[in-house]
Image (tube, coloured by chain):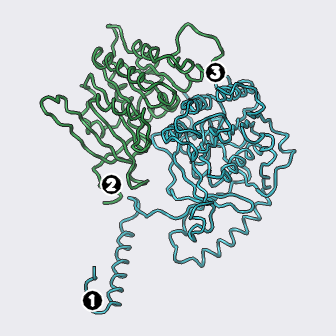
């Protein structure tokens, strides 16, 4: 959890906003530091978290989370975190020893191209629907790179369906939050991905767009973050609020500063 | 708890990682690293290839130099007695193995290096203009003979067969492999998986004997010879087979003691979407851009080099940061005996660590310079423009 980012986003550990969809969109750079931020933020706040980690292994997320002061292993044991390790699961689906277990694998669609993402949706819903006795606060769904699902051969329309179902269930029914990372670039001519980014940015309440510097690589400034708060009520003519910052990633934290005010150039 | 006889602070020693020959632990994130066989490439990608990761090499146009990198990687595996897995659709893997470069013996190499150092020492004495280059650490680091991480090779000779016979090598040659052409990638995955399980590289059930590393080399994946049409048509039928293969392969690598180098004819892939997806699904991505056939071939700026070397993506492993070397302008040079990657020129020095005084010095220097110019242009106080 980066305290500076919490200040920028006006978010607070004590009273988190509920029912929000946050889109992290990275362009020609890696926005995964924001995923680590939200993961540690929600775990600290005591939310029930379901994390679909399709890019890296569990140990990677765990080690980074430990740097940010959260232990994923204990969170898993306490039942606070449900972690789907995409890399491992997909190996099991495609190269499993043939023993078809009763329990359906969330990434079933890999072996059966005609199937949709219903099993994955069921997995998300089951892990976030909690009994009324549980002590965890609002449920949160985190997805590290939705666009990986497109690379795995999921039809774009089916993916949008999946996201719509998730939004309906988590954001409105359970009053929880969703944080979704997707990859995007202007010149990749990837129509499916564009469709996905458009859908998500239309429906999200907060967009964090991470971009590499247009002038190229710099040691001291790692990129630019554009925060867009969507106007909550379009009918009243509220406009989006946009703010730009530049950031630098350190070993355990990230510093944000206004454009052009890096310590290197002042 | 330990009794408080000594201080509670103890230096972590190795963590039991460095028992495998030819590996070392990364200083930055504790990952186990293996050498790619080219010392200058190792230093560019954070000290070496982390075990369990995937290096994607985007081939140069005529595929002359990327194959060399694959051979270096294999040769390094032979010298370190790692197991090899070679898959190809074009050349027979056994022929690839016969053409590996010969490793240089340590003492022989030292002599060579001493000579080199002498000449560079003389060079440095005479070098006055490029003062910023003087303190630059050379990319070519000499590996200590005892650490046995990374070796040097002679490209002009091929490796002796005795060395090769000592290594276990698994091959996958597409034309002789009987599989349905529809799903080449699945059968390739299955054969890698079989090797990993049978030879005990699996992380979940640790090896009982000596631990070892499996080096996987996949040549020109995605080309037409693999039965893939992403290089041939704008709207390929099997758009997702390569990306799905990469995802599952990465899962396999993460679970086992193996490391994979894969070359891909990226310039042939028609759809930009596939290209960017493939990059996103790999850990490290480097690209070779040879000058052959381009106008740069005759440009005097590049006369010492054969092509440009791009590091498109560095892996983020166990940390928020990724290892990024300072310079992005790199070029490779193929001499008769070896391939090296060098930095073409330095980026401008803008950093918050440069002391203020030196910056002021610079500005004073420039003042003096401009004053000098003013002297030359007598009587003129303003510039014309």
Q: Is residue A199 left or right of residue B179?
A: left
- Return the x and y of residue B35 as percentages of the image width and height: 66, 46
Identify the residue under disc 2: A262
- A100 or A110: nearer the eye? A110
Q: How far apart are marks 3 and 1 (CA)?
A: 80 Å
In the image, the chain rendered in cyan is B
Question: For residue A95, which numbered disc appears in the image?
Answer: 3
Q: Are marks 2 and 3 on the same chain?
A: yes
For disc 2, the chain is: A
Residue B12 visible in rendering: no
The image shows residue A232, relative to residue B277, as above or below, that is: above
Identity of the residue furthest to the left in this view: A236
Chain A, colour shown: green
Residue B63 visible in rendering: yes
Image quarter in which the C terminus of chain B is found: bottom left
- Return the x and y of residue B152 as percentages of the image width and height: 73, 55
Question: For residue B380, which numbered disc appears in the image?
Answer: 1
Q: Splitting the image into 4 quarters, where does residue B105 fall?
A: bottom right
**Residue at left 24%, top 41%?**
A242
The image shows residue A128, relative to residue A9, as above or below, that is: above
Mark 2, secondary structure of its residue = loop
For disc 3, the chain is: A
Q: Residues within 10 Å of mark 1 (few under 14, many from 20)?
A: few
Q: Are marks 2 and 1 on the same chain?
A: no
């Amino acid at each position: 959890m980066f305290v500076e980012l919490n200040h920028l986003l006006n978010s607070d550990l004590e009273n988190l906003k509920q029912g929000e969809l946050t889109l992290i969109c990275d362009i020609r750079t890696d926005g995964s530091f924001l995923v680590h931020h939200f993961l540690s933020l929600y775990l600290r706040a005591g939310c029930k978290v379901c994390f679909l980690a399709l890019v890296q292994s569990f140990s990677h997320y765990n080690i980074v989370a430990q740097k940010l002061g959260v232990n994923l292993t204990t969170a898993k044991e306490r039942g606070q975190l449900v972690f789907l390790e995409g890399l491992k699961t997909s190996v099991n689906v495609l190269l499993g020893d043939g023993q078809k277990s009763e329990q359906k694998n969330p990434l079933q669609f890999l072996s059966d191209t005609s199937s949709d993402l219903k099993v994955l949706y069921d997995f998300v819903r089951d892990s976030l629907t909690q009994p009324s006795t549980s002590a965890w606060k609002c449920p949160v769904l985190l997805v590290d790179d939705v666009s990986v699902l497109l690379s795995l051969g999921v039809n774009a329309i089916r993916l949008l369906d999946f996201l719509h179902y998730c939004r309906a269930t988590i954001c409105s029914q359970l009053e929880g939050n969703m944080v979704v990372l997707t990859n995007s670039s202007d010149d990749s001519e990837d129509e499916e991905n564009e469709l996905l980014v458009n859908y998500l940015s239309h429906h999200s309440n907060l967009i964090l767009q991470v971009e590499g510097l247009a002038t190229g690589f710099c040691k001291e400034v790692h990129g630019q973050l554009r925060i867009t708060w969507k106007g909550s009520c379009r009918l009243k003519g509220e406009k989006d609020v946009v703010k730009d910052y530049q950031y630098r990633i350190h070993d355990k934290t990230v510093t944000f500063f206004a454009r052009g005010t890096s310590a290197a150039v002042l | 708890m330990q009794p408080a006889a000594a201080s509670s602070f103890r230096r972590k020693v190795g963590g039991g990682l460095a028992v495998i020959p030819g590996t070392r632990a990364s200083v930055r994130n504790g990952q186990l690293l293996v050498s790619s066989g080219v010392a200058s490439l190792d230093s560019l990608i954070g000290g070496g290839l982390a075990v369990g990761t995937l290096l994607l090499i985007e081939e140069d146009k005529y595929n002359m130099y990327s194959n060399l990198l694959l051979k270096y990687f294999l040769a390094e595996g032979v010298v370190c007695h790692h197991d090899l897995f070679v898959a190809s659709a074009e050349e027979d893997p056994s022929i690839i193995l016969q053409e590996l470069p010969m490793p240089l013996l340590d003492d022989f190499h030292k002599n060579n290096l001493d000579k080199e150092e002498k000449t560079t020492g003389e060079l440095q004495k005479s070098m006055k203009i490029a003062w910023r280059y003087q303190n630059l650490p050379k990319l070519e680091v000499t590996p200590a003979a005892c650490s046995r991480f990374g070796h040097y090779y002679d490209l002009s000779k091929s490796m002796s067969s005795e060395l090769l016979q000592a290594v276990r090598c698994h091959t996958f040659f597409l034309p002789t492999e009987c599989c349905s052409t529809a799903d080449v990638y699945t059968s390739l995955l299955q054969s890698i998986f079989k090797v990993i399980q049978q030879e005990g590289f699996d992380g979940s059930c640790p090896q009982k004997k000596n631990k070892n590393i499996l080096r996987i080399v996949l040549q020109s994946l995605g080309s037409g010879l693999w039965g893939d049409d992403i290089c041939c048509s704008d709207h390929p039928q099997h758009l997702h087979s390569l990306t799905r293969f990469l995802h599952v392969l990465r899962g396999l690598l993460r679970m086992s003691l193996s490391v994979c180098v894969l070359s891909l004819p990226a310039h042939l892939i028609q759809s930009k979407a596939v290209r960017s997806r493939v990059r996103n699904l790999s850990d490290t991505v480097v690209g070779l851009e040879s000058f052959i056939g381009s106008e740069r071939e005759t440009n005097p700026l590049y006369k010492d080099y054969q092509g440009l070397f791009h590091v498109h993506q560095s892996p983020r492993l166990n940390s928020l940061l990724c290892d990024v070397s300072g310079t992005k302008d790199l070029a490779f040079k193929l001499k008769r005996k070896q391939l090296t990657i060098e930095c073409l020129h330095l980026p401008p020095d803008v950093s918050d660590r440069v002391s203020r005084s030196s910056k002021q010095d610079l500005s004073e220097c420039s003042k003096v310079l401009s004053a000098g110019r003013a002297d030359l242009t007598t009587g003129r106080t303003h510039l014309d423009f």
